[in-house]
Amino acid sequence: MASTQRIDVLVVDTDDATAIDLKEFLSEQDCGVHLLSDPAQAAQETRRHRYQLVFLDVSPGNRAGIEALEAIREADSDLCVIAMTALPTVEMAVATMKHQAFHYLQKPLDADELRAVLEGAIREKGLRIDLETRLNAEVGVRIRARRKQQALTLKQLANRTGLSVSLISQIELGKSAASVSTLHKLSAALQVRMTYFFETV
C-alpha cells in the first residue's frame, strides 16, 4: 500500500472550543494540527513551519483575522487558507476572496461541509498525493524533458528502446510505473544515468 504525504494544518482561532473541535476533526483525517490563538503570530508561524493548510478565524469585530490573512499572503501567495467566521457578512466574504482564501465557512462548523471543503482543498491544491503517484509523475516529466531536449518523437524513442509508443506515453504522463528494465532501456536511449530520473525526488 502506497504511503501518503501527511498534511500539516495550522488552526488560528481565539475561540478555544472551536479550535479544539477542529483539531479533533482534522486529526481524524490524518492531519498534523497546530493550534494558535493569536492571529498576529499567524504569518510568522507559517514562515517558521511548513504548513499546507491554514484554518483562520476572520469573525467581524476584530480586524486581527483579516490582517493575519493579509500578512500570510504577503509571506506566501500559494498557501491554502480556509476562512471561518461566527457572523458572515458580504464585506468579509469579499475581503477573504480578495486575499485568495480557498473557502469561507460559517461557525459553528458543520462536519459534512467541513469534510467536503477539506477534500476539495486537498484535490484542487494537490495537498495529499500518494508518494508512488508523485514519483511516477516526476519520472515521467524527466523522461519527456530529456526526450524533447534531444528532439526525439515518441516513435523515435520507441524504436531506440524496443518499447511501445503507448507505454512510453503512459510513463511520461505518470499514468504507468516504469519497471527497472524499462528505465534501463530509456536511460540508455536518452544517454543519461538511471539516477537522473530520481535525483532530488
Image: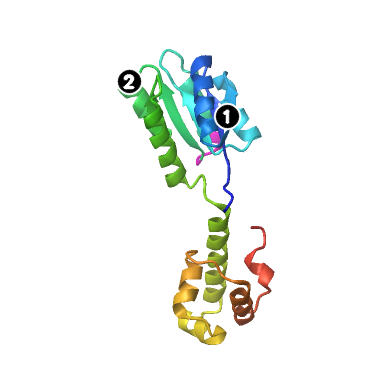
Which residue is disc 2 drawn over?
89
Q: What stretch of residues is rendered in magenta?
A: 74-78
Q: What is the quadrant of residue 187 in the picture?
A: bottom right
Instruction: Please state the horizontal and vertical placement of residue 3, each as a whole percent of the image.
Output: 59, 50
Q: Residue at x 63, y 67 (%)?
A: 197
Q: Residue at x 38, y 31 (%)?
A: 112
Q: Magenta stretch mostly in which secondary structure?
A: loop
**Residue in front for this viewpoint, 182 or 186:** 182
Instruction: Please state the horizontal and vertical placement of residue 198, each as a whole percent of the image.
Output: 65, 63
Q: Residues within 10 Å of mark 2 (few under 14, many from 20)?
A: few
Please tell me whether mark 2 sits on a helix, a strand or a loop. Answer: loop
**Residue in front for this viewpoint, 167 or 40:** 167
Q: For the residue marked with disc 2, what is the amino acid?
A: Thr
Q: Is residue 82 visible?
A: yes
Q: Earlier in the sequence, mark 1 or mark 2?
A: 1
Instruction: Please state the horizontal and vertical placement of residue 134, each as a whole percent of the image.
Output: 55, 56
Please tell me whether mark 1 sits on a helix, a strand or a loop. Answer: helix
Q: What is the quadrant of residue 82 in the picture?
A: top left
Q: Residues within 10 Å of mark 1 (few under 14, many from 20)?
A: some
Q: For the residue marked with disc 1, what is the amino acid?
A: Ala
Label placed on residue 43: 1
Mark pair 1, 2: CA separation? 24 Å
Q: Is residue 126 above or below residue 156?
A: above
**76 magenta-colored:** yes
Marks 1,2: beta carbons within 8 A = no
**53 magenta-colored:** no
